[in-house]
Amino acid sequence: MRIDLHAHSNASDGTDSPAELVAAAVAADLDVVALTDHDTVSGHAAAAEAVAALPAGSRLTVVPGAELSCAVDGISMHLLAYLFDPQEPEFARERDLVRTDRFRRGRAIVERCRELGADISWEQVQRIAGAGSVGRPHIASALVEAGVVATVSDAFTADWLANGGRADVRKHETDPVVAVRLVRAAGGVPVFAHPGAVKRGRTVSDQVIAELAAAGLAGLEVDHTDHDEETRVRLRGLAGELGLLVTGSSDYHGTRKTVRLGEHTTDPEVYEALLAQATGAKPIGR
Ligand code: AMP
Ligand code: FE
Ligand code: FE
Ligand code: ZN
């Protein structure tokens, strides 16, 4: 079984449509892929249609999910949520709040970039983002188009879009304890995404992770491209101490990042344990 529990489509900052992501997952020989766009479930329906249209004998299952933008003590962090009821009103309202604020913040970042001499526009960013939940990677693509930086990842420096960078503007982010409770109340299963991704900025303390565990966190995403070996060993130990599951996932973003779909995977027993905790939605199989 090959199980990748973290992938983005163009419903947020990935470059594949949900249907293209489904095709890419089949091509990558995956059995399970989770669709976890930032603060939105808008790709789920198209992914489900694409799964239904797969040829008989296909074994791909799509786990509907999302990746929630959170912050604690001013430190941004991401919470993966799987198999929640997308209609549950309180959680849906919170996702709405974050998505809406992404527009205000996106415009403000574009304004900052222009002040700093980058010839980009909000119209251009909107064209790049399309219907997707708009974020810094779309603005990074605009900076690449304008010749300001060579790659998307080169835009995530202190000069431009990195956390605390010259053109960074914060968006509304949910307190992670609140987010964990919202996900659970909607029947979903919360997993802390890339908890040790230091190259993105400050990361939260073990104390905070312990508080999240007490609030209902199910697991830590340990095998992730942004974690070195030492970080993985440390996080695995912490997960053991706190009774948390350990997942591995690619965090695929299509051509906006270099990581390949299925580059990191989750053990089947862990996947089963996550499924056993979910009551809000069912995995989408053919
Ligand atoms: P936003 O959700 O708009 O705050 O943007 C965060 C997104 O930017 C993350 O989900 C990643 O896709 C991307 N990102 C953050 N840090 C980096 C980095 N250092 N290099 C490349 N992409 C990054
Ligand atoms: Fe992203
Ligand atoms: Fe993330
Ligand atoms: Zn992600």
Image (tube, helix red, strand yellow):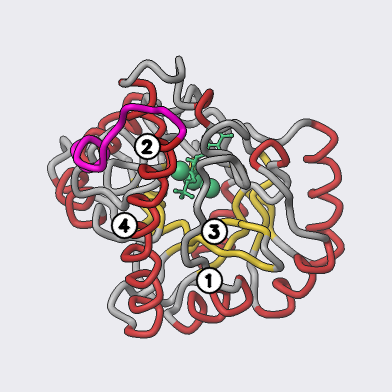
Q: Which residue is mark 4?
A: 103
Residue type at mark 4?
Phe
Q: Is residue 63 magenta?
A: no
Residue 236: percent from left, percent from top? 80, 49
Binning the other alpha carbons within 10 Å of mark 4 as few (below 14), some (14 to 19) or many (20 upward) gives some
The structure residue drawn at horizontal position 64% and vertical position 49%, both measured from the top left corner, is 221
- Is residue 182 depicted above or below 189 in this figure? below
Residue at 39 percent of width and 51 percent of height:
108
Number of residue marks: 4
Q: Nearer the viewer, mark 4 or mark 1?
A: 4
Q: Which mark is residue 272?
A: 3
Residue at mark 2 to residue at mark 3: CA–CA distance: 38 Å
Mark 4: secondary structure: helix
Check the image and report above or below for 63 versus 74. above
Amino acid, disc 3 = Glu
Q: Is residue 121 magenta?
A: yes
Residue range highlighted in magenta: 116-127
How far is the residue under mark 3 from the one under mark 4?
Answer: 37 Å
Q: Earlier in the sequence, mark 4 or mark 1?
A: 4
Residue that label 2 marks: 139
Would you say 267 lies left or right of 183 here? right
Residue linked to disc 1: 174
Q: Earlier in the sequence, mark 2 or mark 4?
A: 4
Residue 89 in percent (x, y) is at: 32, 84
Q: Residues within 10 Å of mark 3 (few under 14, many from 20)?
A: few
Hey, which quadrant is residue 105 in on the image? Answer: bottom left
Q: Are marks 2 and 4 in contact (CB under 8 Å)?
A: no
